[in-house]
Amino acid sequence: MRNVAVLGATGSIGASALDVIARHPDRLRATVLAAGRNVEALVALCTVHHPLHAVIADPTGLPALEAGLRAAGLATQAHAGDGILDALVASDACDTVVAAIVGAAGLPSTLAAARAGKRILLANKESLVLAGELLMQAAHDNGATIVPVDSEHNAIFQCLPDAHAHAGLSRIVLTASGGPFRGRARAELATVTPEQAVAHPKWSMGPKISVDSATLMNKGLEVIEAHHLFGVDGDRIGVWVHPQSLVHSLVEFVDGSTLAQLGLPDMRTALAVGFGWPERISSGVSGLDLLAQGGRLDFEAPDLEAFPCLRLAFEALAAGGTAPAVLNAANEIAVSAFLQRRIGFLAIPALVEQTLDALPATPATSLEVLHEADREARHLAGQSIQRMAVPA
Ligand code: NDP
Ligand code: MG
């Protein structure tokens, strides 16, 4: 029996993870559920899954969480605040952690799980972008198993399960759906709205990653994620736009072989791989009938002029040190301002580039240095938005 902590339980990945867990009562049990602010949704999940612990990050949510659990007659213990989550993740309450908090807020708990040697189903790509080397080192030193559940990285993991013994690997190719604005020229993107940006053609996801998919920053973050997970430098990571979203990524070997993983775009497949590995368990997702899907697999090069975020991510990876942390932090601020209609769509890459230029990379010698770079980038990007000084 795996005892699972689902961090970000009220989100899109959280829902998919709990769906897979509920299909396997004989081998999977949700023992810790954690959310940010949405007490009502968290209580509703507790009534279905009966975890031992429920955690709400926002401390003001504790009384409502306690009252909700009591009213539902549950024995689940209520907790609030960030520190308790790190302690619970490291405790005997779980052996498996679904890291699905959105943004850099997911780093401390993911790191705690790595230090405690847990199996980590890693969705929170921002934690790898921010502190990939430290996180991978902590996992290695403490015997933690990281199974990436970001669909592209999960595909590569399936093609390359022995992630650090790949002498014959020559290149990784990440596929990208291209998002809702694929095929549009830069000038056509100036007036797109948050509603249009989050209407992803293939995947149903939370708002932040949906905007990242529309700017192609999601693919940029994934390039950095792949570098850390698989030890491959940026010049050996390719990106192909693949509008059908059926080939989730490809791995090329020196002998001319290419392996790919295919499947319907449904995150439950990757999560089932993470829970079951090395066994295969059912996910609720049906097999891929390529003929029924139209029988076509198309691929094209990404348009870096219309979607500069992908270029910025490759540049931040090449610069190294604190640059990826700055990229990620500026992007989080920009996406949140875009969703609040404070800046336009084209201001997202502009703000990220401006922040990267203002904060040149320094060596990432410690977690504190990275946190400081993250704080500085958020501050600078926030100031630019306030002064309306974002070029576009
Ligand atoms: P959602 O916005 O749907 O969910 C985010 C979750 O994080 C919510 O449960 C939210 O709680 C919780 N949360 C936010 N801040 C905190 C905090 N400080 N402490 C604890 N919980 C917090 O996002 P997604 O599920 O789409 O994405 C989650 C992560 O997975 C992201 O890093 C994303 O990049 C990655 N990912 C997602 C994919 C997808 O298909 N959705 C695919 C690949 C990767 P609350 O509801 O209370 O706000
Ligand atoms: Mg992905």
Image (cartoon, helix red, strand yellow):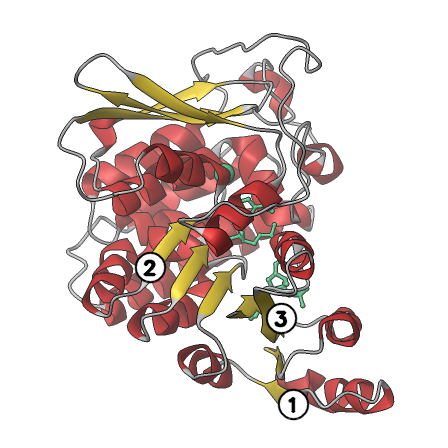
**Residue 345 sits in quarter:** top right
Task: Depth check: give the residue in front, 313 or 43.
Answer: 43
Q: In this view, does 126 lie above or below 237?
A: below
Which callout, 2 or 1, points at the residue further toward the start of the chain? 1
Q: Which of marks 2 and 1 is in front?
A: 2
Mark 3 CB within 8 Å of ligand 1: yes
Amino acid type, residue under disc 3 in the picture = Gly
Q: Is residue 118 left or right of residue 37?
A: left
Q: Measured from the top left, where is residue 68 in percent x and y?
A: 81, 85
Q: Residue at x 35, y 34 (%)?
A: 312
Q: In this view, does 150 lie to the left or right of 335?
A: left
State yes or no: discs 3 and 1 in contact (Cβ < 8 Å): no
Q: Which of marks 3 and 2 is nearer the N terminus?
A: 3
Task: Sort mark 1 into few (<14), some (14-19) or many (20+) by Cα contacts within 10 Å.
Answer: some
Q: In this view, does 369 lie above or below 315?
A: below
Q: In this view, does 41 lie above or below 92?
A: above
Residue in view at x 46 percent, y 42 percent = 351
- Tell me the element at label 3: loop
Q: Name the residue under label 3.
A: 36
Question: In this view of the protein, which residue sits in the foreground, 85 or 352?
Answer: 85
Disc 2, disc 1: CB below 8 Å?
A: no
In the image, farthest residue toward the front: 26
Neighbourhood count class around disc 3 (C-alpha, 10 Å): few under 14, some 14–19, many 20 upward: many
- Per the image, label 1 sits on a secondary structure element best described as strand
Q: Residue at x 39, y 58 (%)?
A: 127
Q: To which residue does mark 2 refer?
A: 145
Q: Which amino acid does label 1 sit on?
A: Gln
- In the shown orientation, is residue 338 left or right of residue 142? right
- In percent of width and height, residue 64 lies at 77, 86
Residue 141: image location, x then y, percent: 19, 67
Q: Mark 1 points at which residue?
A: 77
State the image coordinates of residue 173 (x, y, percent, origin top left).
Answer: 35, 24
